[in-house]
Image: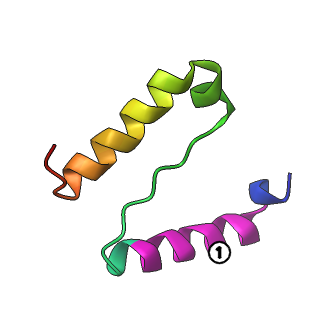
Amino acid sequence: MHHLTPEQQALDAYRDQRVADAGWRQVKINSVDMSRGQEWVVARVRQALRKQGLQR
């Protein structure tokens, strides 16, 4: 539950911005994604890879 505190949310946002500034794309998978199954999760990762320029 610590991610619900304003302090932790601010740290998470700062980290996410640093990652984006470095040119990385994060794919955050949560329990709802997992409940939709492997194909759903793989599709999310593939989509992110395509957005980063992977052609396949």
Taking the magenta stretch, the answer to whether it contains residue 50 is no
The residue located at (32%, 48%) in the rendering is 48
Give the vertical position of 46 relative to 54 (above or below): above
Could you tell me which secondary element the residue under label 1 belongs to?
A: helix
Q: Would you identify the image quadrant in which residue 44 lies?
A: top left
Q: Would you identify the image quadrant in which residue 24 lies?
A: bottom left
According to the image, label 1 marks what residue? 11
Q: Residue 36: x, y in percent?
A: 57, 18
Report the span colored magenta.
Answer: 5-19
Between 32 and 37, the one nearer to me in the picture: 37
Between 6 and 33, the one nearer to me in the picture: 33
Image quadrant holding the C terminus, namely top left
Residue 44 vs residue 6: left or right?
Answer: left
Disc 1 residue type (three-letter): Leu
Q: Residue 50: x, y in percent?
A: 21, 47
The residue located at (65%, 20%) in the rendering is 35
Taking the magenta stretch, the answer to whether it contains residue 8 is yes
Residue 22 vs residue 27: left or right?
Answer: left
Between 41 and 14, the one nearer to me in the picture: 41
Q: Within 10 Å of the Cα at label 1, are there few (<14), some (14-19), or many (20+) other Cα atoms?
A: few
Q: Would you identify the image quadrant in which residue 42 lies?
A: top left
